[in-house]
Amino acid sequence: MELGAAALHAGWSAARDDLVGETLTRLAGLTTPGLPEVLPIVRTWWGPATDPARAASPAALGDVMAHISRVESQLLPASPLGLVWGLDEPLADAVHALVRRHRRHADGTSLAAALARIARLDIAAGRWGAAEDAAAEGLASAERIGAEHIAAECRNCLGWLAAARGDGRSVGHLTVRTLHLAGPRRDRAVSASAHWNRGMAALAAGRADAALDLLARLDEHGHEAAHPIIALLASLDTIEAAVHARRPEIGRRRAEALDAWVRRTGAHWAIFTAHLARALLDEPAAERSYRAALDVPGASRRPFDHARARLLYGEWLRRQRRRRDARQQLDAAAETFHALGARPMLERARREQRLIMAPARRDTAVGTGMATLTAQERRVAQLAAGDLTNREIGARLRISDRTVGHHLSNVFAKLGLCSRRDLAATGISGRS
């Protein structure tokens, strides 16, 4: 049984549906007490994403998780899998129970694995301090016993937190070792998570093109970082990067995968994210989609995602010149980001708040910021306001796309702006 559960995790991490299917078939042949009762739901969660199946009713999930834990705890879904199925709370309860059990029995390897699992779930629930503590403890324990896969999962949790907090240097440090070791092991889930972290950091720094180059790999057939479940979790980052990089076809491809997952699972998280995807990709449907996302039951249980939806909606409302409505969404988003310590998103919300100031106050703030731009930042800003892409600007100024993104990030921060549309509205393209 234990070997079968380990094989299930290995096949899933490698994105090998054939190995997962073979393992589930072998498990069905075992006579372990309790296994026949839990195997159908285990098969539903772990099986290929194309299988037409739905999970147990939410009311029964707590009992189901407890039953699986008694049979073999490793049959519980991996944390990313639990998140896309919307199993956050019952899975977290089950894994917290495992942490307590393994502490009592001084089982170092199992404790490290459980800590890695709970860190990912605590991140989603907005318990970032607890997630950081669990991931750090799990990492130290995994490195001490040589459990590299567990260590990599812990590093990826810490890397996600670093990206969300705007600590790009830590993201780079944490992902270098992970990617170095994950490639030869063909651990696509680990590689995909590291790419996601790097993509998040690039997007937070205003480098949409670089972010998209990383995030688009997550569903690229044959790529070492391609993993369907991590691609689903990273959908909103990918779609937003695609919109900013003016490559909406990549965003639409990810949105189609989300819609398919909604049809398969009915998971509230997937419904929420699919609405946000539609809002970003379909301007006429934007307001209807933002409202629908915020109305999804339980959406606020993932505070970062919920605040991000409010931020996106607030940005859209501000562009429609609905200042009062925008302020309501932006204030709520900023409050959550501040509480979480999500610095890039907080700064973005605050820039939007400044943009809905009275016009005279806003013009003064922009005018003051103009005087602080360097000569190169001004040239980049003028070209960006003239509707050139990062690649086109880089070619004209003979600098890299990444450098263009860095300059634009500085320009937006200094002027209190959030988009090229806002930049064009300042009239900078016509200034000498």
Image (cartoon, rainbow, N blue to C red):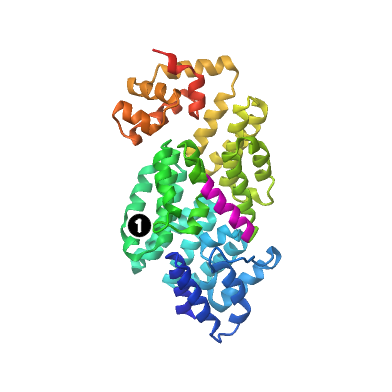
Q: Quadrant of residue 389?
A: top left
Residue most extreme to the front: 249
**Residue type at mark 1?**
Thr
In the rendered image, the residue lying farthest to the bottom is 31
Position of 309 compared to 110: left or right?
Answer: right
Q: Please provide the residue range marked out in magenta.
A: 252-264
Looking at the rendered structure, the number of numbered marks drawn on it comes to 1
Give coordinates of residue 202: x percent, y percent.
41, 41
Residue drawn at (59%, 59%) of the image: 88
| Residue at the left extreme, as displayed | 398
Majority secondary structure of magenta residues: helix
Residue 49 position (above or below residue 29):
above
As for residue 344 lying within the magenta part, the answer is no
The crowding category of the residue bearing disc 1, from other C-alpha atoms within 10 Å (few below 14, some 14 to 19, many at least 20), is many
* Residue that badge 1 annotates: 178
Rendered residue at 45%/72% (across/down): 19
Residue at horizontal 39 percent and vertical 32 percent from the top: 390
On screen, 147 above or below 413? below
Residue 231: percent from left, percent from top: 49, 54
Image coords of residue 391 (percent x, y): 37, 33
Along the line of sight, the residue nearer the viewer: 320 or 336: 320
60 w.r.t. 201: above or below = below
Residue 335 appears in the figure? no
Find residue 385 and report its image quarter.
top left
Q: Nearer the viewer, residue 61 or 286?
A: 286
| Image quarter in which the C terminus is found | top left
Image location (x, y in percent) of residue 201: 42, 43
Viewer can see residue 32 = yes
Q: Secondary structure at mark 1?
A: helix
